[in-house]
Amino acid sequence: MKLHDKDYSQLTQEEIAQWEALRKSEIVGKLGKLTVTESRFHDYPKAVRHFLSLFPNNYLDIVELREESRLRAALESFRKLLDTPDVSERKILNFIRDRRAYFIVASLLKAYFRFGHHEAHLFPEFQLGNSYKADYLLVGQNSSGWHFAFVELEAPHGEITLENGDLGAAFRKGLAQVADWNTWLEARYGSLSESFDRCRRADAALPAEFTQLDKTRVHYVVIAGRRTDFNERTYRVQRRKQKESSELLLHYDNLTDAAEEIIGKPTY
């Protein structure tokens, strides 16, 4: 479930030394007995930014959003992939992994949710016990705590919607997966703490949101098809699903639009 080859749960002596020097430079003065500091978090070594997060090897580094040329090139290649007739869910997953283009999926946080701007993490191919696997789990923090979005990718082409705009086979398959996940979470949510424990920073405790199910914090996303597959009836179904069951139905052009918008932003 790691995003990177490097293990960010440990720091080298050089990284620790760089971090300590920057921490000293953050002290800008005194106000009586109080020390006045100015954060230089963005200047910390990449390894330190990851290390300080709750899940170092799954942290979505906001500083990377400044790498506009690299991200735009990855997004353009992703759009070309989506246009190929034989593109599959597996090819999409492999592209995002191989290009380290995790910002594409993470862009859903800013575009469709109100969490992740304090801290955000991504878990690819996240296991729910031995029975199910979400293509991605997005975990984001806001002022009210931690929230979760389970993401299912379906085909960009094929039986996406029916002629009248109702959901076709691709979306029905994705929603069936979501129903299975929801049932599993209601029965076994507490067991997920084992997975999160393996990924958390060694000196950090898991917040209650990771061990006690609060359905208001759990969301589901199913992505299938392209913009041309949706009509007004489809959008009505989309609005109803999101309101009634926290199920967000999107097409891949929604995803690329969100990814385009997040590039250069200060946070997810």
Image (cartoon, rainbow, N blue to C red):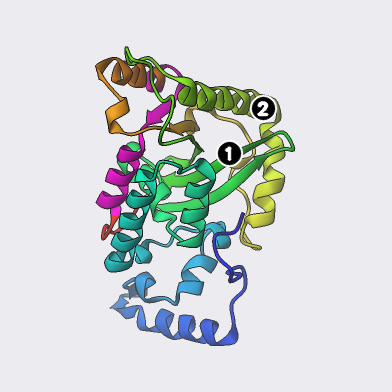
| Disc number for residue 184 | 2
Q: Nearer the viewer, residue 50 or 85?
A: 85
Question: Is 37 part of what is drawn in magenta?
Answer: no
For label 1, the residue is: 134
Give the residue at x 25% y 50%. Answer: 261
Question: Can you say whether 34 is above or below 95 in the image?
Answer: below
Quarter of the image that includes the N terminus:
bottom right
Q: Secondary structure at mark 2?
A: helix
The residue most toward the front is: 85
Instruction: Return the x and y of residue 224 as percentages of the image width and height.
Output: 42, 32
In the rendered view, would you say 187 is above or below 126? Answer: above
Q: Which residues are magenta?
A: 242-262
Image-quadrant location for residue 185:
top right
- Residue 45 located left or right of residue 178: left
On the image, the x and y values in percent for residue 111 come to 31, 41
- Is the residue marked by circle 2 packed among few (<14), some (14-19), or many (20+) residues within 10 Å? some
* For residue 244, above or below residue 251: above
Q: CA distance from mark 2 to mark 1?
A: 12 Å
The x, y position of residue 175, in whole percent, is 51, 23
User: What residue sits 67% from the left and 40% below the top?
Assistant: 192
Q: Amino acid at mark 2?
A: Trp
Which residue: 45% across, 52% down?
120
